[in-house]
């Protein structure tokens, strides 16, 4: 069985990013903007490494307490607002 250290925050950010972006239908959803949002959120939230193996599911629920979940959504929303206002590329016509 293979085990490795995985940043659970990164996984969760990528899982939630679509959900959060759905609240802002007019914003650009290209990979670049998505990556910008993720990078901002990840810098803010910091990393939480867990050992990923068959025990991954347990580690996930453990880390998904209410406070963390809240912080994740708030930070992602904040990141999205910033990127929406200032996309790092030209507006598509
Ligand atoms: Zn974009």
Image (tube, rainbow, N blue to C red):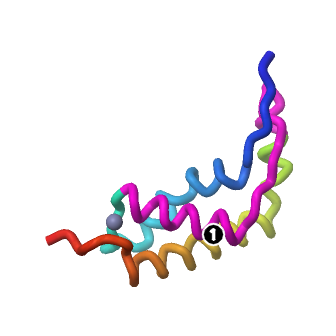
Using residue 70 as the reference point, say whether residue 30 is left or right of it.
left
Compared to 58, does 24 lie above or below?
Answer: below
Task: Find the residue positioned furthest to the left.
Answer: 93
Report the front residue among 7 and 25.
Answer: 7
Mark 1 burial class by Cα count in 10 Å: few <14, some 14-19, many 20+? some
Give the farthest residue toward the top: 1
Task: Judge by depth and name the residue closer to the eye, 66 or 31.
Answer: 31
- Tell whether position 39 is magenta: yes
Q: In terms of depth relative to the viewer, which is nearer, 42 or 20? A: 42
* For residue 49, above or below residue 52: below
Seen at 51% across and 67% down, the residue is: 37
Residue at x 57% of width, y 79% of height: 78
- Helix, strand or loop at label 1? It is helix
Q: Position of residue 8 (x, y in %)?
A: 73, 48
Give the residue furthest to the front: 89
Quadrant assignment for the N terminus: top right
Q: Which residues are magenta?
A: 31-58
Q: Dominant secondary structure of the magenta stretch?
A: helix
Q: Position of residue 55 (x, y in %)?
A: 83, 31
């Amino acid at each position: 069985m293979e085990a490795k250290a995985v940043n659970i925050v990164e996984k969760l950010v990528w899982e939630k990013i679509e959900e959060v972006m759905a609240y802002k239908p007019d914003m650009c959803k290209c990979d670049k903007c998505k990556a910008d949002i993720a990078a901002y959120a990840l810098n803010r939230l910091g990393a939480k490494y867990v050992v990923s193996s068959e025990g991954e599911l347990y580690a996930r629920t453990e880390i998904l307490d209410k406070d963390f979940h809240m912080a994740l959504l708030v930070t992602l929303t904040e990141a999205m607002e910033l990127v929406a206002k200032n996309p790092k590329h030209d507006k598509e016509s």
